[in-house]
Image (cartoon, helix red, strand yellow):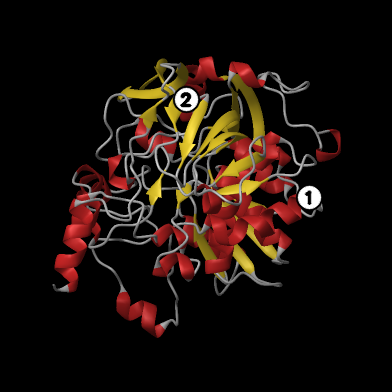
Amino acid sequence: MTTSLVEAVKEALHIGMPESTPKAAASGETMRAVVYHSTKDVRVDDVPKPAVTDPTDAIVKITTTTICGSDLHLYHSFIPEMKTGDIIGHEFVGIVESVGGQVTKVNLGGRVCVSAVIACGKCDFCRKKQFSLCDTTNQSKSMNYMYGHRTAGLFGYSHMTGGYAGGQAEYARVPYADINLLHLPESVPDAFAVLIADVLCTAWHAVELAEVKQGDTVAIWGCGPIGLATAMWAHHLGARRVISIDAVPERLAHATALGGEVINYKQDPEVVAKLAELVPGGPDVCIEAAGSRYASSWQHTIQKALYLETDTIDTVTQAFYPIGAQMEKWLTVRGGQLWVQKDWHMVLDKLVKKEIDQSFMITHTMDLEDTSKAYKMFDKKEDGVLKVMLKPKHAGKPAGFGSGDVAPAMTTA
């Protein structure tokens, strides 16, 4: 048999691939979960509680989850293959309630962070620590067709990325638990630990791809949680200047508080000219952290409608790419989904040692039942919102974490 035929047979029989739809708990128990219904319509519904489905699974009782900026793509029905009833969410932490027979590194009752990216830990990409390229955990044929190859499965992020139930819920089933769960020490509270699942690792991935080093001048488009976390990491690595570009005053204020400079593009719409004024010769590094939903040209609007774009804005003109100018000016353009499992031990270590302070990102804590309100607030960028911590009823609400409260210092966890 040829390689392609072997792969086709394996795919048809789901050989080596985890089930994307979990079994329901034999007891018939239900749980509360954030469910997609249609554009700008997410609700907290009763759904079946998941059970161990594959022998490498774990069931996690979720204690804290949060809304990611990329969840707003789902909220606006921007990502294809979202279906009514899909459970959203890919940033969550909790307690291990049960495990499959082949799980060896996870303890019952252990407190864990769940990776947003679902990796198998054994394929060629995983062995190279390129976990978001895992070719085992995503069965999507449309992803294969559109991209030429499937990437890893993601929690709660459409059937293009595997159709896995997400973590804005009371419980979640985690495939390949040994590679996709990170043990958490008690010194790191949920509100900080949940940021490891995506935002802190994504931002680290950005500065690593950009090779930010001491003395660099770094320009960052976007002051959402990812952009601000990227600015934090750039300062941590010793960048001489960090210039953040956005138009939301509260978010620009956070960038300034981190020690950076800002450009408000509503006040200075000619951003390139303003950068040239501030940095003659240009920045050493430019990082795009705004995301694909914010189009600023008619070409990009059409690309969005036809699903012909990638996850980037008009920083790079996609209709005409100036490859000649890139070559002559010695420019390097890089991008890629985060590699959570490669970086999360390092990020956790820095949290434990208090080498970084990301507490500014945690602006609100709300009950899971109020998630619809949280999405509306986050979508409209109201009340200075950056990250909303969502707490299931069984988790309680930590003292000092009322709605609108900022996170306490790590020493008071």
Q: Quadrant of residue 231?
A: bottom right
Closer to the camera in the image, 353 or 107: 107
Q: Can you give x and y, in whole percent of width and height, for residue 200 in the image?
A: 61, 50
| Relative horizontal placement of residue 56, taking residue 278 as reference (left or right) | left
Up the image or down, 247 lies above or below 119; here it is above
- Residue lying farthest right? 411
Disc assigned to residue 235: none
Q: Which residue is mark 1?
A: 352
Mark 2 crowd level (few <14, some 14–19, many ≥20, 10 Å Cα): many
Q: Can you give x and y, in whole percent of width and height, for residue 178 in the image?
A: 55, 51
| Relative horizontal placement of residue 150, taking residue 237 as reference (left or right) | left
Disc nearer the start of the sequence (2/1) = 1
Up the image or down, 110 lies above or below 16; here it is above
Tell me the residue at 62%/69% (across/down): 212
Is residue 374 visible in the rendered image? The answer is yes
Q: Which residue is mark 2?
A: 375
- Mark 2: secondary structure: helix
